[in-house]
Amino acid sequence: MSRLLFRGATLLPGGEDWQPRRADILLEKGHVARLDAAEAPADAEVIDASRLLLLPAFDNAHTHSPEALARGRAPMERLDGWLGVQYAAGEDTLPEAEIRRAILLCAAEAIRGGAVRVTDHFRQSPQTRDTVAVAAAAWGESGMRARLAVMLRDLPSPSGTPTMDAAACLALAEAVLRDPPRGATLGIGPSAPQRCSDALLGGLAALAHRHGSFVHLHVCETAMDRVRCLERYGRPAVMQLEALNMAGPDVEYAHCVHLDDDELDRMAESGTTLVHNPLANLRLGSGIAPVARALARGVRVAIGTDGAGSNDTQDMLEAAKLALLLPRAGRPDAEWPTPEQVLRMATRGAVLAPGAVADLIAFDLSAPAFVRAAPEELAARLLLAARPRDLRHVVGAGAFLLRDGTLTSPALRAVAP
């Protein structure tokens, strides 16, 4: 059916506006058509939304899909020690069937947590056109709108030595950007500055600019990452990446736990996005990212779960709650983000308004999380008290991905009943 009407919903529009209002939300051809549909079109399916809270769907801005097959490892290790254990059983050398399985598991859990969009910093070693094609196809099969950041590196890491040199990495990047496989939006995902040569980083930046693709990489996740970059470059990582043309509106730095204010200012000036991964930062003891200071300086901030190996779930609702609460453990009160700021980060600023893509999630207002909630409490209740079991519907581009609490895709239900 091409038209869908949510009748009598409580709407949190999104963007800068998280004040609830009543709305009749008409979806048509994958977009929001109206918010005041007085009469339902004859061919519309009408859903009684009088007990539903609707808001823009979540966007998981950073994960690693192969880790869906390897959770709970090295629970007492920080990043370097964890890396040495996490991929030791071959999660970065998966056969094609297991790449697909990992992505469908990742997608099923992500949808059940309210996400319809995802950025997969996809790791395999060696990376090939075939691994990239299989991953893109699996994401396409999932029903989510995925961006696949092809992870590349040519320097050693705690998880092992690289299997490709800079020339091989650049050749692969050129090949997949020139002729991208179907199923996902392709981008470049250098692992991290300390794990890539300047020749590789500069070459990837040039390729991304030439093909108009996005770039996604880890930056200063740990204090040691920052030290290594300072020792190698003689200046902070953000300044070095900027000098290599790896900064700008199409570039995203994941984690950014150990950045100073000058680096945040540079990110704001260039339009580079900070992707906050609060649960993974807590799990690996990496620290608390300076999110409030970044927002105050005008840095664009998104939220990711990180991979299921360092988060152990793919639940964006959980990640958003941690984004709200984690600064309270070690940051001044002035650096505590508000529920509205966190929701804006988790949805990447999306707004449910006429003409917008119809990406939305619907929570059950009769759930315990919302009992006797005043209108002004709904945003906070959503983050602090709601759980995936309270999520009734997830709609991506006008199509149900989760309906009445059940995944609509047989492929997803097969891997995650």
Image (cartoon, rainbow, N blue to C red):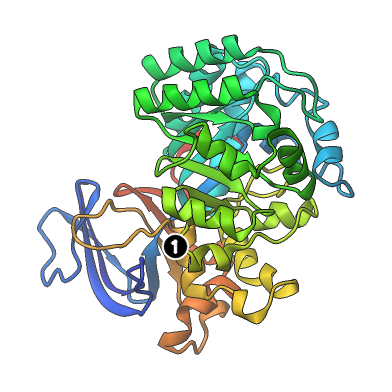
Residue farthest to the front, as pictured: 234
Image mark count? 1
Q: Give residue 52's quadrant in the image.
A: bottom left
The answer to whether any part of residue 108 appears in the image is: no
Give left or right: position of 105 versus 27: right
Q: Quadrant of residue 288?
A: bottom right
How far across and down, in percent of the image, does residue 251 sit?
A: 46, 40
> Disc 1 on helix, strand or loop?
loop
Residue under circle 1?
A: 298
- Is residue 91 toward the left or the right of residue 27 in the image? right
**What is the crowding at mark 1: few (fewer than 14 residues within 10 Å), some, or many (at least 20)?**
some
In the depicted structure, whether residue 194 falls above or below residue 345: above
> Foreground residue, 11 or 340?
340
Give me the residue at 49% from left, 59% from top. 346
Quarter of the picture holding the C terminus: top right
List x then y, in percent, for residue 201: 56, 26
